[in-house]
Amino acid sequence: MIEPAYPAARAVAARAEAHFARHHALVRGHAREDLAPAPDASSIETMVDAAFWASLRREEGALPTISLALVPPAPASHPLTFERWLPLSPASLAHLAPAVQRPGIHLGVWRDASGTLGVWGTTRRLPLLAFVIEVVASGLLVIKHRGESFGKFVNVAVLEGDQVKVVDESDAQRPDCPGVVASLLGVELPGVRADSTNVLVQLAASMRAHGRGGALLLVPSASTTWPESIVSPVLYAVAPPFGELSALVSANGVTRETHEWQEEFRRAVEALAGLTAVDGATVVNDGYALLAFGAKITRRRGTDPVERVLLTEPVEGSARVVVNPYQLGGTRHLSAAQFVHDQPDATALVASQDGRFTIFKWSPRDDIVRAHRVEALLL
């Protein structure tokens, strides 16, 4: 039986092909040996279509979560190769899903001798700019590419049912784009430490993953005014500041390559992000030392209530609109916007229980708090 076509697959294929062609052109002159082949629109459409119909199937009662990568088998990456390639069909993908659902395992897809796309095996290592499509949930797919940093993936497009969101990278070129947003877009800003933005990316992903909603306030280490925006006394104030994550971030590059450091870093991020599930806001300084959690935000004396924020989303076709903070999600979003309005050097990260994620940052250029909707970058 031939599966019906998934219209969004054709709608996104050409746009995704253009994205990869643009990035390949940027790095091709650097003679990179680890560069993946550029995907063509036909291959993209075929893989997206198969992944979508596989996402609607159940295998022993469970929905499949799989990752497909368009790469040929490469001996250097120590792939697991099948004696006979599997057809790139929804049935094959769903049946194989339980064996490859752990993070970091990708099903390798390439064209066989007849030119037909098939699944040749699995791999844990992918070359630069490899085309990847992940089945996140039923009807929810994310197209990604492997970025410069090993293990880092950058979202290209999100497909949910008939809705297609293609990431707009031009947002990173705006002068007031926060470093964490630029990092999620795969762009490193001049003068902004890559390890610093990566910590915030990891914290944001972990906050969203716990599903309880939460707020994280990042304040400058030298700031003495942020307590003026917090109700006193703070129930869970920390003295002295808890610096486990700070110590890990300050480790040298050799140490960071070790499995022990990476595991400790992961646990420290999850522990800090877990505190945001407590009612109130978690406060850390820009060195990632924990100052308080469960903190109640209040309007700073002498300031006006925040009534307007500039809402943006790094997605093609989205508009920049001025809205009331309540329109973003309620009290948590309103209080975070008020905090950034009163403490313009601070950054607020807010996760909603429904999966939405917003980063609040003061925009000197627009003279307003800017709310960056970034859940499309965190899937």
Image (cartoon, grey):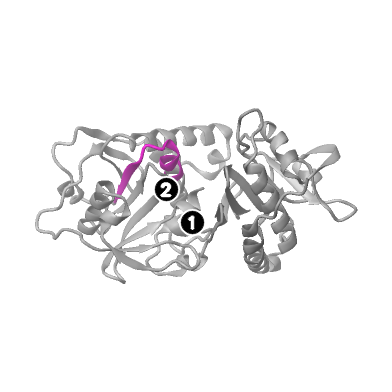
Residue extending farthest to the left is 302
Residue extending farthest to the right is 113
- Residue 220, percent from left and from top: 29, 52
- Residue 150, percent from left and from top: 61, 48
Residue 207 belongs to magenta span: yes
Q: Quadrant of residue 39?
A: bottom right
Residue 25 in view in this figure:
yes
Cβ–Cβ below 8 Å for labels 1 and 2?
yes
Residue 45 belongs to magenta span: no
Q: Image point 43% across, 50% down: which residue?
A: 196
Q: Is residue 127 left or right of residue 170?
A: right
Amino acid bearing label 1: Ser
Residue bearing mark 2: 200
Q: Image point 70% across, 52% down: which residue?
A: 4
Residue bearing mark 1: 183
Bounds of the magenta span?
Answer: 204-219
- Image quadrant holding the N terminus, namely top right
Mark pair 1, 2: CA separation: 9 Å
Q: Earlier in the sequence, mark 1 or mark 2?
A: 1
Disc 2 crowd, CA 10 A, few/some/many (<14, 14-19, 20+) = many
Q: Image point 64% across, 41% down: which residue?
A: 66
- Residue 312, percent from left and from top: 39, 63
Q: Is residue 356 left or right of residue 101?
A: left
- Residue 23, percent from left and from top: 63, 65
